[in-house]
Amino acid sequence: VRKEESVGVLLMFLYSFLAMTAYNILKPSTRSLFIKSLGAEQLPWVLLAAGILIGFIMQGYSRAMGMLPRKWVIPVALGGMVGLLVMFWMLFQTGSDWVAVGFYFYGLILGILLISQFWTLANDIYDPRQAKRIFGFVGAGSSLGGFTGATMTSTVVDNIGTNGVLLVSAATLAICTGTVVWLGRRVPHTRRSDAT
């Protein structure tokens, strides 16, 4: 890593680490809350419906994000994810079983978005020559974040309950959002035609 790239590389590492930590804290809860509310026998039907609905949702997401300047797409999307996590936390207080279905869908979409957004930004910032040098280190943040999130889940559940996992994940994604905004200000995005 060259000296002039170091800040950007560290921020990208932090971004991947935080995104995967937030997701992997949450991932076990999406399934457990669903099974607790509706039973495991309903899971295949929800997965079938999810496969169909996610295609439509992602198309709508692409259109909506196409209306924003590119440098704001990821921070706005991450902010929306934080807001949805807080909303689901509040909805779970109502005790409705159907909240778990929506939350399960949300968990599936969250995983897809976090990974695709990260690599889209990485490809926007770095050219192929830089990518060969940098992506191994930056991608290690995802692996470390996955491990950290998975190991934190049981500790968080033991201390603040399953619903509290949503707030911890939301706080982690909020820090991730700040990291992406900071990255946008620190790293020149020469490959972006509409970065301003």
Image (cartoon, rainbow, N blue to C red):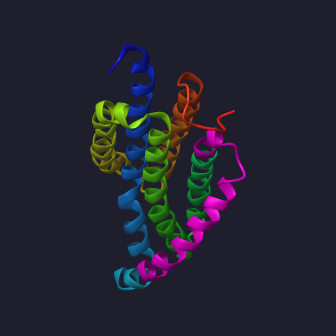
**Residue 72 sits inside the magenta stretch:** yes
Examine the rendered structure and indicate whether residue 128 appears above or below residue 84: above
Query: Can see residue 96?
Result: no
Main SS, magenta residues? helix
Q: What range is drawn magenta here?
A: 46-75
Examine the rendered structure and indicate whether residue 69 appears above or below residue 23: above
166 on left or right of 74: left
- Toward the top, the furthest residue is 3
Quadrant of the drawing holding the N terminus: top left
Q: Quadrant of residue 18?
A: top left
Examine the rendered structure and indicate whether residue 124 appears above or below residue 29: above
- Toward the right, the furthest residue is 67
140 on left or right of 124: left
Quadrant of the drawing holding the C terminus: top right
143 on left or right of 53: left
Residue 27 percent coordinates (x, y) = 38, 58
Query: Can see residue 80?
Result: yes
**Residue 120 sits inside the magenta stretch:** no
Count of numbered marks: 0
Examine the rendered structure and indicate whether residue 50 appears above or below residue 5: below
Q: Residue at x 32, y 40 (%)?
A: 139
Foreground residue among 142 and 30: 142
Q: Residue at x 47, y 68 (%)?
A: 104
Foreground residue among 196 and 52: 196
Residue 107 percent coordinates (x, y) = 46, 62
Foreground residue among 40 and 146: 146
Residue 77 percent coordinates (x, y) = 60, 49
Q: Quadrant of residue 56?
A: bottom right
Q: Residue at x 42, y 35 (%)?
A: 127
Foreground residue among 180 and 131: 131
Residue 68 percent coordinates (x, y) = 70, 47
Q: Residue at x 44, y 36 (%)?
A: 15
